[in-house]
Image: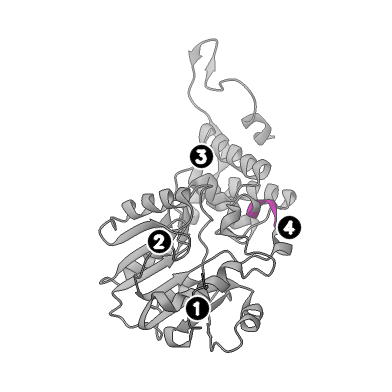
Amino acid sequence: MVSSRLHGRGNPSSVGGKRRPRKPSGWTAAALIAEGTRRFRRARLAYGHGTTNARDEAAWLALHALKLPLAATPAVLALRVGERPARRVLALFEKRIRGRKPAAYLTREAWLGGLPFYVDERVIVPRSHIADLLADRLAPWASPGVKSVLDLCTGSGCLAILAARVFPRARVDGADISAAALAVARINVRRYRMGRRIRPVRSDLFSALGRRRYDVIVCNPPYVTAASMHRLPREYRREPRIALAGGVDGLDVVRAIVQQAGEHLEPGGTLVMEVGSGRARVERAFPRTPFIWAATPGGGDVLVARRGDLPPPAPAPRE
């Protein structure tokens, strides 16, 4: 088989110390993608970190390794590739299978809202449905003149950057409890030259933000229930646990945000928060709060609440 030859030991481009012309590998990009698809299906990988199936995952990794654009044409995919590039692709396929790392961690890139972001194991792979709402400038819940945005649980900073792009007059804070995640966010802020408008800040929810208030708060918090955490595929367990685990009912962080957000919103300000499949649990926890549930293309539950509809702040404990 061609694939076994590519995985053989030794240097195929030299014999007896003399260089010889490199021979074609027998692979095309299309054939490598097909091979990866077969291997991934056989390995029963889990998806959801940028792709939803074996074929798309194989294409993503193959095109990355071959330094080809994701929009490569069929004519480009039909071209022969060299032996070394083919080896690179097959090695990346095996790395994906053996390590069960999401492809985004192998390519160090994830896409959200049509933009690429740097990612690694310090952050969750971006996939928030809030990006779909930001594409429409959070209409009709936010005005085009938004001047201040908080991206709570910012992770890689992707939502902060998307918000800064759609609200060009806004200053944005990207807050996260994880110093490691904020290091990744700073990489992305620099890449998009947003350093004057986006401030990464280490904060346990609102604790380090003082009395600052915002026109909009967006948040994709940890909301996975304890039972679901135990059932997660290995790919998801490669992500930072702190970015996923939401306690027994998945609402430990969500509950705190709903209870505190009103103090950090301007009059008429809006909270937009993703809660996964937790809509029913949220409504049971806050039966008097008239949440709006935004329709997103991906079908994820995203709540919208005006400042005036959020619960009043809890009274300070007596000393």
Q: Earlier in the sequence, mark 4 or mark 3?
A: 3
**Sequence-wise first label, 3 or 2:** 3
Give the label on residue 315, or none. 1
**Residue 122 position (above or below residue 172):** above
The residue wearing badge 3 is 81
Coloured how? one colour
| Tally of numbered tags | 4
Three-letter code, disc 1: Pro
Q: Mark 2 points at which residue?
A: 208
**Region in magenta:** 232-236
Is residue 131 in sight in this rendering?
no
Q: What element carries label 3?
A: strand
Whole-percent x and y of residue 62? 54, 46
Crowd band around label 2 with a 10 angstrom C-alpha radius: few (<14), some (14–19), many (20+): few
Question: Which quadrant of the rendered structure holds the N terminus?
Answer: top right
In this view, the mark in front (4 or 3)? 4
Q: Distance between the residues labelled 4 and 2?
A: 32 Å
| Location of residue 91 (image quadrant) | top right
Marker disc for residue 233: none
Three-letter amino acid code of the residue under disc 4: His
How far, Cα to Cα, is label 4 from label 3? 42 Å
Question: Mark 1 or mark 3, which has the lower sequence index?
Answer: 3
Residue positioned most to the front: 319
| Residue depicted at x 62% and y 56% | 55
Q: Residues within 10 Å of mark 1 (few under 14, many from 20)?
A: few
